[in-house]
Image (cartoon, grey):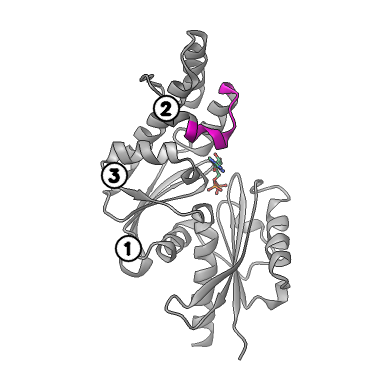
């Protein structure tokens, strides 16, 4: 029998992600054969484009997928999906595939922050999410980067060059933006301001994390995990090591593709 493939699609507020998995005979039992990311999320062309791109990259067709599972904020809009599931379980499974020792997941996406406590085997125990507010999210960092005229990708290395402490005390995006503008007007160094922004995000996210309790291994997922400045600030705030992976932003889609195999299993049982 030829190896089966599943597809996981994670439609976030900011980005669409897709992962195709193949079953293998090694211990993990699954291998990533394709992944794609389109930086447009729910309500855009992102969902359709990300599926097309993931298929084109590995030369498969939708019909070759044994099961397609969609997750994320925009999961209802994925017509090709056989099933939809909340992103909480998908993130837990994705993080567990990347780091089998995971007990806490800190996920910072475009518009929300989630902290998950994970039990044995990648099963979700409990979680906490931010309220409907951009504080501590990728959106907050995007707004600050725009005011500072800095690329999102450059925030981490600029933050590392900070030599003087500048505090950004407002967690509200609108007030923090005004605070950044007034620090710039006072000729404060942009690297110091960025460092202050990262500490502000870390303070906000750490407050959420403490509500569920932080147990090692702590894994950071979501697009913001690529910003090592936020990761370092969170490590300092929580006084713990935090690990991440180049696949951090795909954790939800990866988890969806893994859960698609479970769905297949239950259909066959
Ligand atoms: P969602 O699922 O809510 O769409 P993601 O987990 O895909 O969110 O993350 C999107 C966020 O990731 C963006 O808001 C952006 O701030 C951040 N991001 C994406 N790429 C980078 C990068 N290279 N460096 C820093 N931040 C990034």
Q: Label 2's element?
A: helix
In this view, which residue lies farthest toward the top? 186
Q: Residue at x 48, y 38 (%)?
A: 137
Which label's residue is closer to the chain start, 1 or 3?
A: 1
Position of 238 relative to 23 (above/below): above
Residues in magenta, as a range = 147-157
Q: Is residue 147 left or right of residue 162?
A: right
Category of crowding for the residue at label 3, using alpha-carbon neighbours closer than 10 angstroms: few (below 14), some (14–19), many (at least 20): few
Q: Residue at x 38, y 21 (%)?
A: 163
Residue identified by numbered label 3: 211
Instruction: Choose between 195 and 61: the one closer to the eye.
Output: 195
Q: Foreground mark, 2 or 3?
A: 2
Q: Which mark is residue 24?
A: none
Q: Dot 2: few (<14), some (14–19), or many (≥20) neighbours within 10 Å?
A: many
The x and y percentages for residue 195 are 42, 27
Q: Residue at x 31, y 64 (%)?
A: 119
Is residue 171 among what the camera can see?
no
**Ligand 1 within 8 Å, label 1 CB:** no
Which of 24/161 is in front?
A: 161
* Residue 165 pos. (x, y %): 35, 20
Residues at discs 2 and 1 in contact (Cβ within 8 Å): no
Q: How would you classify the magenta stretch by its main secondary structure?
A: helix
Q: Are marks 2 and 3 in contact (CB under 8 Å)?
A: no
Which image quadrant is residue 84 in? bottom right
Q: Report the front residue among 174 and 29.
A: 29
Q: Which mark is residue 101?
A: 1
Residue 195: mark: 2
Q: Name the element at disc 1.
A: loop
Residue 204: horizontal and vertical position, in percent? 37, 34
Q: For the point 26% across and 48% down, which residue is it?
A: 213
Question: Can you name the residue that lies furthest to the bottom here?
Answer: 1
Task: Dividing the image into four quarters, tell me where ligand 1 lies.
Answer: top right
């Amino acid at each position: 029998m030829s190896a089966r493939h599943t597809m996981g699609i994670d439609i976030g507020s900011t980005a669409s992600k897709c992962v195709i998995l193949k079953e293998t005979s090694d211990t993990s039992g699954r291998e990533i054969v394709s992944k794609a990311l389109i930086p447009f999320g729910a309500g855009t062309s992102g969902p359709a484009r990300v599926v097309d791109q993931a298929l084109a990259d590995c030369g498969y067709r939708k019909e070759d997928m044994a099961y397609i599972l969609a997750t994320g904020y925009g999961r209802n809009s994925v017509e090709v999906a056989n099933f939809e599931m909340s992103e909480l379980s998908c993130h837990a499974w994705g993080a567990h595939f990347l780091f089998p020792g995971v007990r806490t997941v800190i996920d910072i996406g475009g518009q929300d922050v989630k902290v998950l406590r994970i039990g044995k085997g990648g099963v979700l125990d409990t979680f906490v999410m931010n309220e409907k507010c951009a504080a501590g999210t990728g959106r907050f960092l995007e707004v600050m980067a725009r005011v500072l005229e800095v690329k999102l990708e450059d925030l981490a290395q600029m933050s590392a060059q900070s030599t003087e402490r500048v505090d950004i005390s407002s967690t509200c995006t609108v007030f923090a933006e005004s605070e950044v503008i007034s620090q710039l007007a006072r000729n404060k160094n942009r690297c110091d301001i960025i460092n202050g922004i990262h500490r502000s995000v870390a303070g906000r996210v750490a407050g959420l994390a403490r509500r569920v309790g932080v147990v090692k291994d702590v894994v950071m997922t979501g697009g913001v995990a690529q910003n090592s400045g936020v990761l370092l600030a969170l490590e300092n705030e929580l006084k713990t090591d935090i690990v991440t992976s180049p696949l951090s932003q795909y954790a939800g889609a990866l988890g969806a593709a893994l859960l698609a195999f479970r769905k297949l299993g239950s259909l066959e049982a």
